Amino acid sequence: MFLGIATPNPGDDSTMYHLGQDLPGNDVDDIEDLISADDVKPRERYENKKNVTVRAKKRIQIRPETEEEEEKPKPTIHESVIPGTQKVFVKTWGCAHNNSDSEYMAGQLAAYGYRLSGKEEADLWLLNSCTVKNPSEDTFRNEIESGMRNGKHVVVAGCVPQGAPKSDYLNGLSIIGVQQIDRVVEVVEETLKGHSVQLLQNKKKVHGRRVAGAPLSLPKVRKNPLIEIISINSGCLNQCTYCKTKHARGDLASYPPEEVVERARQSFAEGCCEIWLTSEDTGAYGRDIGSSLPELLWQLVEVIPEHCMLRVGMTNPPYILEHLEEVAKVLQHPRVYSFLHVPVQSGSDSVLGEMKREYCRQEFEHVVDFLRERVPGVTIATDIICGFPTETEADFEDTMTLCAKYRFPSLFINQFFPRPGTPAAKMERIPANLVKKRTKRLTDLFYSYEPYAERVGEVYTVLVTEVSHDKLHYVGHNKSYEQVLLPMRENLLGTRVHVRITSVSKFSMVGEILDDERDWTRCAKKQEIPEVQVQTRSREQLIQRYVGIALVVGSLAFLIQLLLRFL
């Protein structure tokens, strides 16, 4: 249940990929926006109601199809695939890491000549999944069925097929593993030819170490051309008993600092003015390669142009504790947002132990207290799971007192979901009505305070990078990464402006622009690619295209020759 907007993604309803065309249906959530309102499974609606009898579903007799019955459309099988003649629809569920993976896959497809499109006109659907919660997987499964029902080729990617590739509804489908996104073109080509390809293996180890994934230098088509999402590591060091993502992403594997820094430099050169660092746990970065998060952040700060910004992604408490002093210093830097997402999940030490979170309440409180003391105006976002199987009333009261103490401006409230294959799925569950009751109590507490109530009249400098959900405002963020809604003035996106707050709501502030347009500061300008590079790329693309055409023409000539022999 999503109840706070720590890092709102106002452009969720905007086009998925910026190619100068509308691509509907590509709603991709930010890493801070993993919470869905669909938290009640059908079984939970009746399992605590004594007067409801659960009856087995009658087996439906399967009848042979008759000629009169309408057959489902079948995907067109292409004997030969010429890039540029097929269209691909890309849809993503889940976190910013998934979003980044989809941008990479879209970038490679577009660079090879495929056209990105909406659902209806596409020849193939590429569906990138999230395994955090049941509803997102259910929607993913429904989308697969919808694509097949409509005669589309379907390729699946992401954490669901990586973690459970033998699921019945994935039978016969092509699968791109989380570490194989750099091979998306060949998987799409083979699928269009009617073949099923499954690439689930990890990258080969380099010098005995796991590789984090595909190279960061791959081409991208960004959902928001002003924001670059960089995955700094994959996997984590935890073994949380409720988490399914570990099954897909595995143990920690970090990208070398120089590769991350080069990607940031490249992104700014391409016109981005904001970078989001993402991973399953940014705080654990570098532990496998002899580096650390602060070391990476200080290197990144050196390449961030003036007026551009960096946002640090989610970190679990255990791995940020030893770096608190340095992290606090980085968050004070003028080109780094004073924002950190630190999920606590429960205020009870007993529950945290059962979850195997590897920290206690006191350690989490130390993180929050330290950062609030050292970083002026810092925004701390956190997550809570209500109804974990071992949670007692006393445990939940501990959670309530923690949230009441800190009054987090951004609070993500989840009901517990038993994910198949996790230790927590085998635990005896709390009655659904009790989970709902606890969720409502925490929700009511969250809505009982207004974090921005005293802000009317305040003046801030904001970086404007996004469009609001309702498409009626542009969205800027101040140094604390607090959301400020602004009028949709021409040329405002990608600028830094001074604003005065005129009104506030629970989740955001509304501002008026104080500067004349001539005083707006453009945060980044797209650098021209050297002519030699342009010519080289164009030559390579032409060679690829003409080789493909030559192969097709050669095949046709051969077939015609065979036909003439037999006639």
Image (spheres, grey):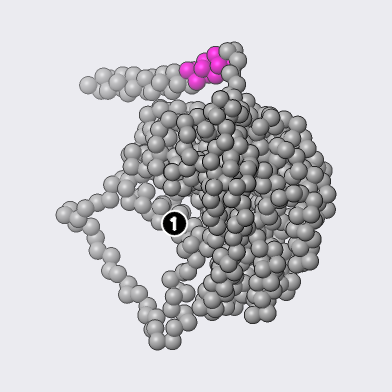
Instruction: Give residue 84's position: percent from left, percent from top.
Output: 41, 27
Question: Could you tell me residue 512's position as x and y percent?
Answer: 53, 41
**Any magenta on residue 565?**
no
Q: The magenta stretch spans which residues?
A: 533-543
Q: Is residue 537 located in the magenta-colored stretch of the structure?
A: yes
- Residue for badge 1: 139
Main structural element of the magenta stretch: helix, strand or loop? helix
Q: How many marks?
A: 1
* Between 523 and 163, the one nearer to me in the picture: 523
- Residue 190 vertical position relative to residue 533 in the rendered view, above or below: below
- Can the viewer see residue 154? no
Question: Three-letter amino acid code at disc 1?
Answer: Thr
Horizontal and vertical percent for residue 141?
44, 56
Q: Residue furthest front?
A: 457
Label 1 sits on a secondary structure element that is: helix
Image quadrant in which you'd find residue 330: top right
